Image (tube, helix red, strand yellow):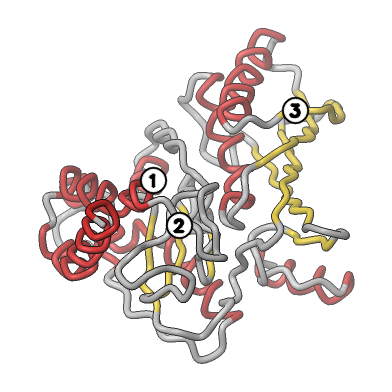
């Protein structure tokens, strides 16, 4: 019995489509309700060694990323606690403080839940968001695209394998509303690629896995070992993987989309806000000193600069 088989069994019985998007998308009159549920425990999610507040932040962010991958921000969180007798009230108070920090950063609210008692503690969160045009794993169009990853991967998997505390995931904005498809990498980077391939028959993605690796991993991998193994597991990895088209019908040639919530697929744009792309490239270069991975975007950056200069100079 494995997770994949269990998901397919439940999907068959309940007549659901679990791979179409990171969150469940429920159509309403003028919008869509986004719903996602995740459970966490100290043992299963390798939370050993973390301070309680850090545990709370890791779990809350892990629960929220499914909504972010749909191009929306979380609005409400309902939680269920199974508490154990080996931790006192101050432990759960500190975990709750960490959860609240992340929820508050997104302007969302914890609105209630349930509590029980178990042999080992477990926290389950159901997160709600809203979007008129949610981003799915299924591509909205079959056109040429570039893949983007909000940060490097593998550090959490290496930490878990080495029995070290997991690194806390950084704050991430939702994927752009103009993304063709998106998913998080909570099951591992390669698993995320497989989830995209599974629902997009015939899609072609030319990916250099090493470019997704945290550069610090190369110094920790034993001699002769393939560092790519760090992209297989799914322990505490919550970056977002998304695709943007090479060209955008609703923007002038050379212009790029803006960050959420600034995207306006009907033609409105603010040139300054499109500079997120340049800043991300700069940040990547500072962290990785990897000029080779940046150079393919030279033409795109130049076109963006030319269009921006044209707009401001008239």
Q: Quadrant of the N terminus?
A: bottom right
Alpha carbon distance from label 3 to label 2: 30 Å
Q: Are marks 2 and 1 in contact (CB under 8 Å)?
A: yes
Identify the disc placed on residue 247.
none
User: Which comes sooner in the sequence, label 1 or label 3?
Assistant: 3
Which residue appears at 78% of the width and 29% of the height? Answer: 81
Which residue appears at 72% of the width and 68% of the height? Answer: 18
Q: Is residue 19 left or right of residue 251?
A: right
Alpha carbon distance from label 2 to label 1: 10 Å
Pointer 3 residue: 110
Measured as percent of width and height from the top left, residue 207 is found at: 32, 74
User: Which comes sooner in the sequence, label 2 or label 1?
Assistant: 1
The 10 Å Cα crowd at callout 3, few under 14, some 14 to 19, many 20 or more, is some
Please name whichever residue, 80 or 206, is drawn nearer the observer in this view of the structure: 206
Measured as percent of width and height from the top left, residue 257 is found at: 42, 60
Which residue appears at 74% of the width and 35% of the height? Answer: 77
Pointer 1 residue: 161
**Mark in the foreground, 1 or 3:** 3
Please name whichever residue, 87 or 132, is drawn nearer the observer in this view of the structure: 132
């Amino acid at each position: 019995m494995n997770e994949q088989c269990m998901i397919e069994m439940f999907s068959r019985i309940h007549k659901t489509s679990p791979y179409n998007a990171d969150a469940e998308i429920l159509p309403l009159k003028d919008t869509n309700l986004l719903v996602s549920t995740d459970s966490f425990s100290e043992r299963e999610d390798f939370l050993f060694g973390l301070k309680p507040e850090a545990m709370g932040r890791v779990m809350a962010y892990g629960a929220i990323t499914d909504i972010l991958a749909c191009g929306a921000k979380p609005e409400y969180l309902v939680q269920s606690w199974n508490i154990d007798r080996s931790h006192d009230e101050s432990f759960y108070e500190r975990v709750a403080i960490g959860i609240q920090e992340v929820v508050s950063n997104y302007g969302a609210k914890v609105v209630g839940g349930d509590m029980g008692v178990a042999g080992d503690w477990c926290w389950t969160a159901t997160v709600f968001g809203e979007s008129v045009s949610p981003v799915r794993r299924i591509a909205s169009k079959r056109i040429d695209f570039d893949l983007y990853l909000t940060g490097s991967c593998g550090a959490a998997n290496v930490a878990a394998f080495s029995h070290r505390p997991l690194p806390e995931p950084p704050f991430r904005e939702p994927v752009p509303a103009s993304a063709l498809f998106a998913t998080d990498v909570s099951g591992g980077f390669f698993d995320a690629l497989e989830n995209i391939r599974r629902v997009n028959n015939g899609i072609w993605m030319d990916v250099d896995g090493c470019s997704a690796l945290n550069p610090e991993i190369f110094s920790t991998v034993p001699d002769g070992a393939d560092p790519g193994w760090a992209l297989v597991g799914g322990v505490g990895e919550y970056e977002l993987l998304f695709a943007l088209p090479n060209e955008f019908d609703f923007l002038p040639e050379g212009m790029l989309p803006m960050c959420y919530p600034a995207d306006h697929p009907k033609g409105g744009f603010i040139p300054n806000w499109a500079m997120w792309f340049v800043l991300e490239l700069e940040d990547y270069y500072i962290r990785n000193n990897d000029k080779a991975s940046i150079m393919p975007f030279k033409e795109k950056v130049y076109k963006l600069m030319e269009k921006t200069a044209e707009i401001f100079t008239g």
